[in-house]
Image (tube, grey):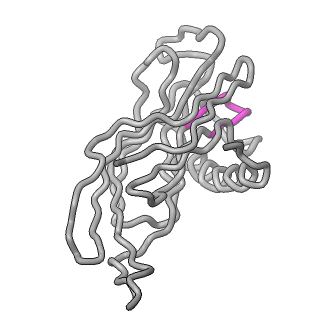
Amino acid sequence: MRITKKLAAGVAGLAMVAGVSLAGAGSASANTAVGCGTSTAPILVSHPVSIMDDGNRLGQLYLGYFADCKGVYAEIHWDFGPTAPVQPNQAGEGGMSVYRPAGTVYVEGENKDGFPGTTFAKDHLDGTFTTSPIEDIHHNRWGGTYAAPLKFLPDVDLTVYETDTGWHQSTNCTNKHMWGNWHTFSDGGWGSGIYLSCT
């Protein structure tokens, strides 16, 4: 599947909204990426990957980037979902479960530096963003310099709690580690995955 320009622009616009609020909150736990968003808006630098559970899209995982601080971050844009299970109609159509994702989203670098993540626990899918701390693409936490190709990717450790239309509860994807599409900043390379499956 090739990402369309329209989709890329739409997700980048969503990342911009979330990224600017993140930059405004500061980046105390970030690597050395400071001043992010003061002079540039964030851009999308990896193809978004859909997070799927039993055929339902929960959200999209991707990388965002601030050029002014050379900082990369992982982000999940959650889909919208009901706050209580929706019963199907008389024909058995239209029923919807409630999905409650919990876990940690973070950036993984080529050198496996153990970057910190952002934990989340949602009552339902709500259209919001979960964003990792911003990491410097050129320098590690000990002052060393990364070599090309400056490869980073978004990661999520995910558990999904589901309440179906019969009010049965199940746990899917227990602490499952999933990677999104990578990006190499030295040469502009992109990963090309389409989705991550919880089940």
Foreground of the two, 135 or 58: 58
**Image mark count:** 0
Name, please, the residue furthest toward the bottom. Answer: 90
Residue 46 against residue 127 in the figure, above or below: above
Of 29 and 135, the residue lying toward us: 135
Which is the main secondary structure of the residues drawn in magenta?
strand
Quadrant housing the N terminus: top right
Q: Nearer the viewer, residue 110 or 179?
A: 179
Residue at horizontal 47%, vertical 12%? 142
Q: Residue furthest right?
A: 5
Drawn side of residue 194 relative to residue 99, left or right: right
What is the magenta range?
64-73
Which quarter of the figure has residue 37?
top right
Q: Is residue 22 on the magenta stretch? A: no
Q: Is residue 102 above or below residue 65?
A: below
Give the x, y percent position of residue 188: 73, 25
Q: Nearer the viewer, residue 67 or 35?
A: 67
Q: Is residue 96 above or below residue 29?
A: below
Left or right: where 192 falls relative to 135? right
Residue 67 among those drawn in magenta:
yes
In the image, taking residue 168 as reference, residue 184 lies left or right, namely: right
Q: Residue at x 70, y 49 (%)?
A: 12
Which residue appears at 59% of the width and 9% of the height? Answer: 145
Q: Position of residue 171 (x, y in %)?
A: 23, 55
